[in-house]
Image (cartoon, rainbow, N blue to C red):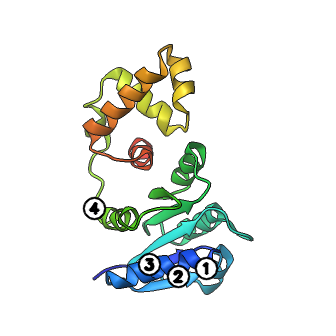
Amino acid sequence: MKPTIHIIDDDEQVRESLGLLLETVGHDVLTYVSGDAHVDAAPDLTHAVLILDVRMPGRDGLETLLHVRTRSKNVPVIMISGHGDVPLAVKAMQAGANDFVEKPFVANRILSAIDRLGEPVDMAPDALAALTPRELEVAKALADGKPNKVVAHELGVSVRTVETHRARVMSKLGIRSLAELVRLILLP
């Protein structure tokens, strides 16, 4: 049984196109024009995945996410934004988002995020043990939302060196995005 997808976005075109895509692959879809509308409807979050825009009038995506987390610690939430940046992604992950996707996105990016959320995260400390001390230092700095330039300056290395370490970290951990790295580093 596929989860019901809750799309919460003030952009009608995003809601319609994303809803149609997800329905064509067999998901039930509920759409909401705002975080306030979702909170007011108080839908059942059992076997649901939320796709939540960060910037909306009224209750924004982060406020909505915090409200959702008071009702359910486990419902998967994918944050989407046309204004994504590393600090915003880190803030969303710290608030309890499971993934962060920048608009515009390709269909496969959203579909793979939904599929991946069903997989248990079993890496945590054991996976991090595979990193060298410097790679772990770089991974933690990146997970804190620091840009490559800042990490390079703090560690006294070149930006290219930080990029190389970042690539090795992603490869060793078998992850593809900064959001996955943040989630792994922030695991309790």
Q: Secondary structure at mark 4?
A: loop
Q: In front of the other: label 3 or label 1?
A: 1
Name the disc covering residue 5, or none: 3
| Mark 4–mark 3 CB contact (< 8 Å) | no
| Amino acid type, residue under disc 4 in the picture | Glu
The vertical placement of 147 against 182, above or below, is above
Q: Which mark is residue 119?
A: 4
**Of helix, strand and loop, which one carries label 2?**
helix
Residue name at image x 43 percent, y 25 percent: 162
Q: Is residue 23 left or right of residue 72?
A: left
Residue 6 spot, x, y in % from top left: 49, 78
Tag 3 and tag 1, C-beta contact below 8 Å:
no
Task: Decide which of 86, 96 is in the foreground and name it.
Answer: 86
Picture quadrant of residue 59: bottom right
Q: What's the CA distance linking mark 3 and mark 1?
A: 16 Å
Which is nearer the eye, 12 or 50?
12
Q: Amino acid at mark 1?
A: Glu
Q: Position of residue 177 (x, y in %)?
A: 39, 47
Disc 2 target residue: 16
The numbered mark, 4 or 2, whose residue comes first in the sequence reads 2
- Under tag 3, what secondary structure? strand
